[in-house]
Every structure is written in C-alpha cells, then in structure tokens.
C-alpha cells in the first residue's frame, strides 16, 4: 500500500494552486489508494496471526516503530506523521511536545485508530501494543477487533472537556456506556456502583448527585474530572492525555495533574502526555519526545531534555518559556514559519529557521544521532559525536 504514496504528488507543482484537471487526477488517485487500505482494514474473520507480533522490549507498553500516517487531500499528500519511533515504558509517563500541527495528536489518534478516514490512513510502520499475554500491531488490527481495545486497554482523555461530553445524556449514563461496552453481561446495579466509585476516585464530591447531572451543569474542572473518570473506569494499561489542562485555570490545572499522577500509580498504568506546555512536561514526564513537522527531532529523559537541550529547535522552545529567575523585556520567539506540509523539502525541515545551520544541513534529512545512550537528536551538529561513540 505504501509503495504507491508518491504517485499522489501534484505533478511536482511548486504551489498549492492546481487546475481543476490536476485536482481531479489527485482525487482519483487518492480514492484508489484509500479504498484499497479501507478494504483491507474492514475485512472480517481475519486470522489473529496477521496482526500479532513481538515487543522489542517486553518492559514497554507500546512501541511506535517508523510510524507513517498520511492525509490524502485534493492538493496532495500531507505527511502528518512521517517515520516516528519511540517507546512508552510500563508505569512511566512520556511527554510529547511541539508546535501546533507537528503531529502529536495524530500520533496518539493513530494508536487509537481514530484518525479521520478515509482521508487519513496509517500507511507504514508498526505500533506494537503489549496486551500482557500477546502483542498486537495496531496498524494492522481490523476495525472490529480494535473496538475491544479502544477504551479498554488504551483510553484517551480528549483535548476539550467543554465539548467532549454528549450534552443530551446524563454524566452517569455516559460512563455506564463504557463499562457495559467492555463488560457485557454486567448488571445495572454493578454498573452504577462502579460509575459512582470512579467519580468518587477522581475527587468529585457528591458523586451520586453528579451521576444524574448533565454536562452543562458542571464547571470546566468538573467536566475534565469526568473525562478522566471515563478514561480510567476500565483500568487501562495506557492513558493518552491530549492537552488535559486546556481551558482550565492554573489552580485546577495543578489539581488535574496531581490527580493523573496519583491515579496512574494506583492502577499501575502508563501515560502518553501530549501538550504545548513545557511546565506540565517538566512536572509530569519521565521521558520527553520533541516533534517538528511530523518527525521526532529530539528525545531523552526529562532531565536530559530540560538540563541540556541539544537540537536548536528544542533550545528555542526552552528559551521561549518564561522563567521565574529570568528577567526579560520580551520572550524569545523562534523566527520563520513551519514549512508547507504538502511539499516538504528533502533537507532538514528546521534548516531555514535554525540559527546554527551550516553547509551539511543542505543534504538529506539527518538521521538520529545519540548524545548519550538515552538522549538523541536529529541534527548534523551531533553526527561526529555519534560516530565517535560508535567507534569506541
């Protein structure tokens, strides 16, 4: 399937302005490719052997390996996630950070198989999910089987608590639905008991009263707690928290982060934390992944990323963060703009914005160079360091 990706390019046009004929040709080719992928994904009675695999490290709950998720548009292919590889260890929190549009949320939605289809498709790589007794490659799992995993083994706290809940259903019924879906045959009394119990666990006072309330009757912080309750009620192995503190005031943000940390330890789960807020990452994450234009440009432990950021983009992000002990008239802003996602250059995507760019940056996109066993950056500045370490 992925061998045909490059055919969708709009005849090497330099801009997004296409003729009607060119647009129709791209749309036709898009449909051909996406129809083939959809047909494969929607098959029934698929042998489990087709999507079972092995973890490279059984201590990980999920391993992203060269993941590629593309969107087929009428002006070309948007490579939203283009070769992303990182792991989420069991019981740890991995923070994914970067500018809007860098591919953070698309990476998490790929794991949940919630990318908008048929335009959005996983076209390459593996997402190895550790279920304990077996391992699935989520990129190949058929839709019918994925419904048993989504919300059960992997749960997601969605980005916007104000709009994520259904306004016409009571809070209790929305959480009940999750329990009943993944535990067929459970009694109504047991379902209600578990719902009230999880509402109480996430720190909601008068859980029985909230059970019969509608979303519009709750504050933003209360709704976010309900979203967390809904994600945790099945005791998942992995919690995806996509901007869990969006639109909340700082006091409530601190409470929500403390709650997530406490509940993660209580149910021994892992967290994949997606956010723009470097302060949240510093407080919550054990490991940090920095993304830019669909690729990982730096990754390491939280201590390595915050104490010794290495990629010029990460250095720029750190410089743009306000600090208590630093008095400046104006916060730093990374110059330039993100490149057009339709026609990405062959060289480093950050080159035109980079204050440390040099001749080598004109070459092909840099590989991953290791600064330490756990710290790497996709930057030619560290090529010699990586080569020297390999020859020791």
Image (spheres, helix red, strand yellow):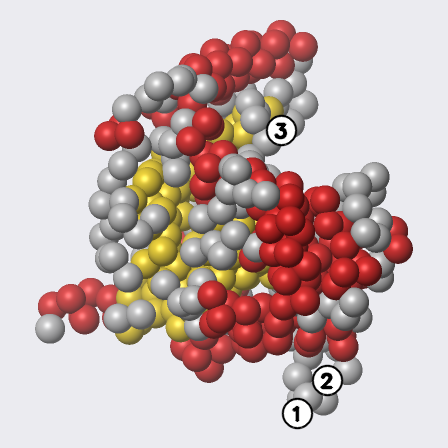
- Residue identified by numbered label 2: 328
The residue nearer to you, when weighing 234 against 157, is 234
Residue at image location 57% in from the left, 55% down from the top: 233
The residue nearer to you, when weighing 346 against 123, is 123
User: 173 left or right of 198?
Assistant: right
- Residue identified by numbered label 1: 325
The residue nearer to you, when weighing 180 against 283, is 180
Question: Which quarter of the rendered picture does the N terminus lie within?
Answer: top left
Residue 6, given in percent of the width and then of the height, sits at: 42, 24
Look at the numbered disc 2 and give the secondary structure of its residue.
Answer: loop
Above or below residue 6? Residue 106 is: below
Distance from Cα at disc 2 to Cα at disc 1:
10 Å
Depth-wise, is mark 3 or mark 2 nearer the camera?
A: 2
Q: Is residue 358 visible?
A: no
Residue 15's mark? 3
Q: Residue pushed farthest left?
A: 392
Residue 108, given in percent of the width and then of the height, sits at: 51, 47
Residue at image location 55% in from the left, 43% down from the top: 186
Q: Is residue 211 visible?
A: yes
Q: Quadrant of residue 254?
A: bottom right
Q: Quadrant of residue 50?
A: top left
Residue 344, given in percent of the width and then of the height, sits at: 50, 39
């Amino acid at each position: 399937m992925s061998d045909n990706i490059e055919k969708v390019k709009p005849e090497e046009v330099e801009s997004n302005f296409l003729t009607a004929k060119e647009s129709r040709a791209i749309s036709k080719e898009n449909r051909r490719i996406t129809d083939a992928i959809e047909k494969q994904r929607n098959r029934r009675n698929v042998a489990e052997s087709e999507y079972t695999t092995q973890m490279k490290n059984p201590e990980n709950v999920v391993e992203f390996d060269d993941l590629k998720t593309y969107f087929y548009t009428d002006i070309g292919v948007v490579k939203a996630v283009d070769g992303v590889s990182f792991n989420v260890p069991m019981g740890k929190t991995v923070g994914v950070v970067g500018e809007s549009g860098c591919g953070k949320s698309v990476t998490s939605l790929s794991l949940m198989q919630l990318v908008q289809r048929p335009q959005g498709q996983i076209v390459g790589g593996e997402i190895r999910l550790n279920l304990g007794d077996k391992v699935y490659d989520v990129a190949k799992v058929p839709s019918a089987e994925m419904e048993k995993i989504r919300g059960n083994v992997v749960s997601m706290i969605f980005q916007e608590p104000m709009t994520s809940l259904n306004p016409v259903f009571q809070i209790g019924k929305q959480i009940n639905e999750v329990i009943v879906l993944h535990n067929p045959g459970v009694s109504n009394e047991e379902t209600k008991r578990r719902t009230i119990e999880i509402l109480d666990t996430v720190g909601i006072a008068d859980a029985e009263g909230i059970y019969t309330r509608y979303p519009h009757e709750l504050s933003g912080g209360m709704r976010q707690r309900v979203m967390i309750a809904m994600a945790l009620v099945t005791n998942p192995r992995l919690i995806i928290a996509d901007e869990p503190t969006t639109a909340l005031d700082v006091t409530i943000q601190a409470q929500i982060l403390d709650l997530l940390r406490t509940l993660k330890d209580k149910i021994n789960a892992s967290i994949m934390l997606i956010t723009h807020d470097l302060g949240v990452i510093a407080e919550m994450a054990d490991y940090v992944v920095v993304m830019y234009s669909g690729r990982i440009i730096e990754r390491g432990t939280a201590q390595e990323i915050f104490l010794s950021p290495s990629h010029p983009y990460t250095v720029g992000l750190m410089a743009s963060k306000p600090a208590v002990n630093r008095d400046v008239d104006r916060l730093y802003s990374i110059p330039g703009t993100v490149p057009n996602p339709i026609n990405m250059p062959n060289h480093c995507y950050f080159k035109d914005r980079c204050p440390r760019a040099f001749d080598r940056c004109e070459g092909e996109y840099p590989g991953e160079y290791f600064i330490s066993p756990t710290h790497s950056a996709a930057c030619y500045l560290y090529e010699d360091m990586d080569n020297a370490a390999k020859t020791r």
